Image (cartoon, rainbow, N blue to C red):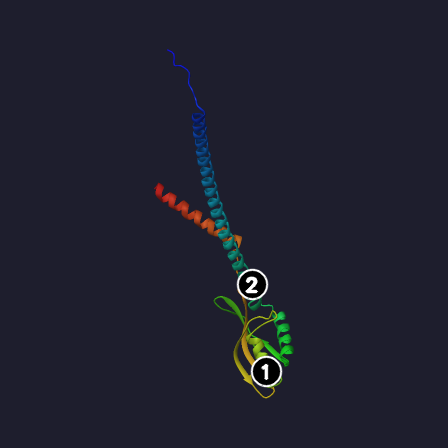
């Protein structure tokens, strides 16, 4: 079968080339759109990761601030209520207080240590000599401890022209006594005996 010659005119060739160009352009547009869509999704994922990391960082900063605040509070508690009686340091602190207030530190009497629910207490009474303004300064130092001084509870004040007696107490922390090994062993032995008795009863 003779199909004859295929005559392509310049116009037909131009139309064919234009069609091919349009198809290629369409393919490129689809590929570019897909690439842009993928880049947009990746950008959104990156933004989500950054936001998550910023949230984690904010939490870490908050935890750090809370830890620092707790450390400051813990140090303040250790200053106000030390871990031991430290009577020698207490006397030195009272002498420094007297110097700062401008009074003469005449006498201190420490009572027997008393055990309270959450702390130990040392009753004491103090005697200072001086004037009215210096007495006020001394009481202020006792009520608002600073420079590493410990907490002081003022129960009663007897004020005279040149002498002031203060009755109150200072505090220190209770000593947490760990159970001795012998006591722990005894408890374990008692538990083992109970378990053996229970087994014997079951066997019977």
- Give the residue at the far bottom of this rendering: 161
Query: Residue 105 got which mark?
Result: none
- Give the x, y percent position of residue 76: 56, 66
- Give the residue at the far top of this rendering: 1
Which quadrant holds the C terminus? top left
Q: Is residue 139 above or below residue 67?
A: below
Query: Residue 72 got which mark?
Result: 2
Q: Is residue 119 left or right of residue 102?
A: left
Along the line of sight, the residue nearer the viewer: 103 or 167: 103
Earlier in the chain: of badge 2 and badge 1, it is 2
> Which element type, helix, strand or loop, lies under badge 1?
helix
Disc nearest the viewer among 2 and 1: 2
Q: Residue at x 64, y 77 (%)?
A: 100
Q: Are marks 2 and 1 in contact (CB under 8 Å)?
A: no
Q: Which residue is mark 1?
A: 135
Q: Rounded to the nearest whole Å, what is the CA distance between mark 2 and mark 1?
A: 31 Å
Along the line of sight, the residue nearer the viewer: 37 or 96: 37
Q: Is residue 126 visible?
A: no
Q: Is residue 89 visible?
A: yes
- Give the x, y percent position of residue 84: 58, 65
- Give the x, y percent position of residue 177: 53, 59
């Amino acid at each position: 079968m003779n199909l004859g010659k295929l005559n392509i005119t310049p116009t037909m060739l131009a139309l064919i080339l234009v069609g091919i160009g349009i198809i290629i352009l369409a393919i490129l547009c689809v590929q570019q759109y897909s690439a842009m869509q993928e880049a947009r999704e990746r950008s959104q994922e990156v933004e989500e990761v950054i936001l998550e990391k910023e949230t984690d960082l904010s939490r870490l900063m908050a935890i750090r601030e809370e830890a620092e605040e707790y450390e400051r509070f813990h140090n303040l508690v250790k200053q106000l209520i030390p871990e031991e009686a430290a009577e020698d340091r207490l006397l030195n602190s009272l002498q420094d207080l007297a110097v700062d207030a401008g009074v003469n530190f005449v006498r201190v009497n420490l009572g027997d240590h008393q055990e309270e629910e959450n702390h130990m207490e040392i009753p004491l009474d103090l005697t200072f000599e001086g004037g009215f303004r210096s007495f006020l300064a001394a009481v202020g130092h006792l009520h608002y401890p600073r420079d590493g001084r410990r907490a002081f509870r003022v129960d009663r004040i007897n004020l005279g022209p040149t002498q002031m007696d203060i009755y109150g107490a200072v505090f220190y922390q209770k000593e947490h006594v760990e159970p001795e090994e012998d006591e722990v062993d005894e408890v374990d032995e008692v538990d083992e005996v109970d378990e053996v008795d229970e087994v014997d009863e079951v066997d019977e």
